[in-house]
Image: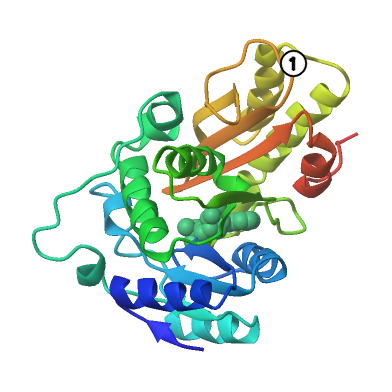
Amino acid sequence: MPVLTHPAELRLWCERVRASGLTVGLVPTMGALHAGHLSLIRRARAECDRTVVSIFVNPTQFAPGEDFERYPRTPAADLALCEAEGVGMVYLPPAEAVYPEGFATRVRVVGPVAETLEGAHRPGHLEGVATVVAKLLIAARPDRAYFGRKDAQQCALVRRLARDLDVGTTVVECETVRDPDGLALSSRNGYLDAAARAQALAIPAALAAAARLHEAGERDASRLIEAAVRRLAESPALSVDYAAAVDPDTFEPLATVTGRCGIVIAARIAGTRLIDSVMLGADAGLAIGNVGCPSPRP
Ligand code: AMP
């Protein structure tokens, strides 16, 4: 399994695959791979002839004071996992290959999908994501690129960006993989001690509360959010950045749920910021079935 480190090598490798009539699936990650990432890789392997995994802790999507320096980095383990999963190539560039001296371009998506919620709470974050993902899509020109629904706003942003920049890539949104207790797998979960983790379980429980209410027929978005917020409040150490019901494509807030609706939550616990989401509506059965949240408390 080749490990390439320069954008020109990424482009050439993918060009060769396409020239031989095969399809390319791209799985962008920041490494510290876990079962959530593996589910994306497996889906890419199932749907594409060759799978490329990129591993890059992207400095431009971290604001000053965030966890860029301490973000987990486990390249040897990541490469072993990719090899075992039958990945065709890993792209593992150093920062100076992605952002060489003189780099001066930013990709900025506008509108609620980029400016609300994560956009408002982490200034510059989504611009950093858009810039690095645009670079990957332009260099690799994958047939399909795989993203996790846990980061629902990122998925919507990348869908918008891929459409607007005519890269010809289908963006595939994959269901969230959770631990048996309901917590969405995240490279940042390692920051949590047992007490913080117990408090963090209110996040999937809050999503499940909103999903249950929706399943029972509630269509007033504010009631769904009230139910989620009530559940979050049972974990007093959790500081909630937002809990919102949004159109999953535009990220405009919803007043009434008539079709698909994303319930999105961001909260901080003991210095760690966690985000999670659930999709209600057309594929609600799938979404709720996968929430893996503890069953309703008696
Ligand atoms: P990250 O390495 O955290 O930037 O994540 C890389 C990709 O994996 C993103 O598209 C994430 O949404 C996705 N991902 C992260 N955690 C999970 C999870 N628990 N289930 C499914 N996908 C995930």
Image point 55% across, 18% down: which residue?
253
The answer to whether 272 is drawn above or below residue 234 in the figure is below
The answer to whether 262 is drawn above or below residue 75 in the figure is above
Specify how the rendered protein is coloured. rainbow
Q: Position of residue 248 (x, y in %)?
A: 60, 30
Query: In the rendered image, which quarter is residue 265 located in?
Result: top right
Asked if residue 188 can be seen in this view, the reply is no
- Ligand number 1: quarter of image: bottom right
Depth check, front residue: 17 or 122: 17
Q: Position of residue 171 (x, y in %)?
A: 57, 49
Q: Position of residue 246 (x, y in %)?
A: 59, 24
Q: Residues within 10 Å of mark 1 (few under 14, many from 20)?
A: few
Depth check, front residue: 72 or 132: 132
Depth check, front residue: 68 or 148: 148
Query: In the rendered image, which quarter is residue 261 located in?
Result: top right
Asked if residue 213 can be seen in this view, the reply is yes
Image point 39% across, 54% down: which residue?
133
Disc 1 under 8 Å from ligand 1? The reply is no
Image point 37% across, 76% down: which residue?
12
Disc 1 target residue: 258
The answer to whether 279 is drawn above or below residue 20 in the figure is above
Q: Position of residue 5 (x, y in %)?
A: 32, 79
The answer to whether 81 is drawn above or below residue 151 in the figure is below
Query: Is 89 positioned to the left or the right of 232 in the image?
Result: left
Depth check, front residue: 213 or 269: 213
The C terminus, quarter of image:
top right
Query: Is 13 positioned to the left or the right of 88 in the image?
Result: left
Residue positioned most to the left: 102
Image point 69% across, 29% down: which residue?
231
Q: How many marks?
A: 1
The kind of secondary structure element at disc 1 is loop
Q: Amino acid at mark 1?
A: Thr
